Amino acid sequence: MNPWATGVDEARLAAVQDALPAGTEMRLTTRSGEAAELASEAAGQVDALYVFGGDGTFNEALNGIDASTPLGLIPGGGTSVLPRALGLPRDPLAAAARLAGGSPRRIGLGRVNGHRFGFGAGIGLDAEIVRAVDELGRQPDGRRPGDLWFAWAGVRTISRHRFRLDPVLEVAGYGRAALALVSNCAAYSYAGRLALRVAPEASFEGGLDLVAPVRLRVRDVPRVLREAFTGGQRRQDRYLYVHDTDRLEIVCDRPLPLQADGEDLGDVERAVFEAERDAVTVLV
């Protein structure tokens, strides 16, 4: 359990633990990277590993867990994309109660430069926005900025580009684009209750989907947002789109920000995305 996650506090920690199977041991993370270490230690040694935190904590657990130990993801972050994409309720207590009697499901994961991700990764604008939100810091109670701050960070970030994004990267074998979004499931993120479905055909049972706008202008923003929320059709002259692939290679004209599951992985000039099919067991 990550006590610094947005939706985690002392009362919820106690309530969630009470909802889990009797005898479940609670371990609190104290620093970045510790959830991956705890998951690695627990792999193969426990009946199930439950993770109560946000998307960053879930991502760490995925990078430490083995293929067979069941993983139960309890929403405790501001967005908590992965458990919601798996059909779990947003309320952590309700999710914990369901997971306590949940059934296993095998899902695939993505990898970018060897780092696992559960729902999505990106190069360029969306990773810049993730970095801008991180730079806002946390409130004294540990909470991260909410959706409105995220939207404001997005407007500020694209305004630094003067609302004009030209091709700055090459997707090997497919062409040039202004940014790249790689999805492992239909939900790339959420804005409140609404899912952003940039690749609505992507699934946990398939490979990876790529959606990469060729270029972006200020007049395009309303259309792009509408397509993201509705999962609508995307014209081939406006996007590069790849469905259910096992491997993608992207080469950038200059170092660009990379994010995976909303975690800033630094700047890269080259990124290799790989589908890790049938990778882990989750409880649903």
Image: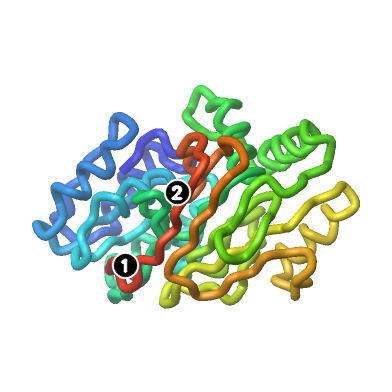
Q: Is residue 273 above or below residue 284?
A: above
Would residue 26 appear left or right of 165 to someone viewing this image? left
Write down the quadrant of residue 188 in the picture: bottom right
Instruction: Say whether residue 280 is left or right of residue 188.
Output: left
Closest to the observer, 141 or 57: 57
Q: How far apart are marks 2 and 1 (CA)?
A: 15 Å
Is residue 93 visible from the viewing direction of this image?
no
> In the rendered image, is residue 153 in sight?
yes
Name which residue lies at 20% across and 59% down.
66
Q: Residue at image x 30%, y 50%?
A: 63
Relative to the observer, which residue lies in front, 54 or 182? 182
Residue positioned most to the front: 173
The residue nearer to you, when weighing 37 against 92, is 37
User: In which image quadrant can residue 204 be found?
Assistant: bottom left
Instruction: Tell me which residue sits at (30%, 36%) in the image.
Output: 33
Crowding at mark 1 (Cα within 10 Å: few <14, some 14-19, many 20+): many
At which x and y percent is residue 60? 33, 46
Q: At numbered mark 2, what does the secondary structure look like: helix, strand or loop?
A: helix
What numbered label is drawn on residue 55?
A: 2
**Residue 244, label in figure:** none
Name the secondary structure under disc 1: strand
Type of amino acid at the residue the image marks with label 1? Val
Q: Earlier in the sequence, mark 2 or mark 1?
A: 2
Asked if marks 2 and 1 touch (Cβ < 8 Å), the reply is no
Quadrant housing the N terminus? top left
Q: In this view, does 37 lie above or below 187?
A: above
Answer left or right for 231 relative to 121.
Answer: right
**According to the image, what is the colour scheme of the structure?**
rainbow
Q: Where is residue 209 in the image (x, y as percent from the top left)?
A: 54, 68
| Residue 282 numbered tag | 1
Residue appearing at x 61%, y 68% in the figure:
199
Q: Which of 201 and 84 is in front in this view?
A: 201
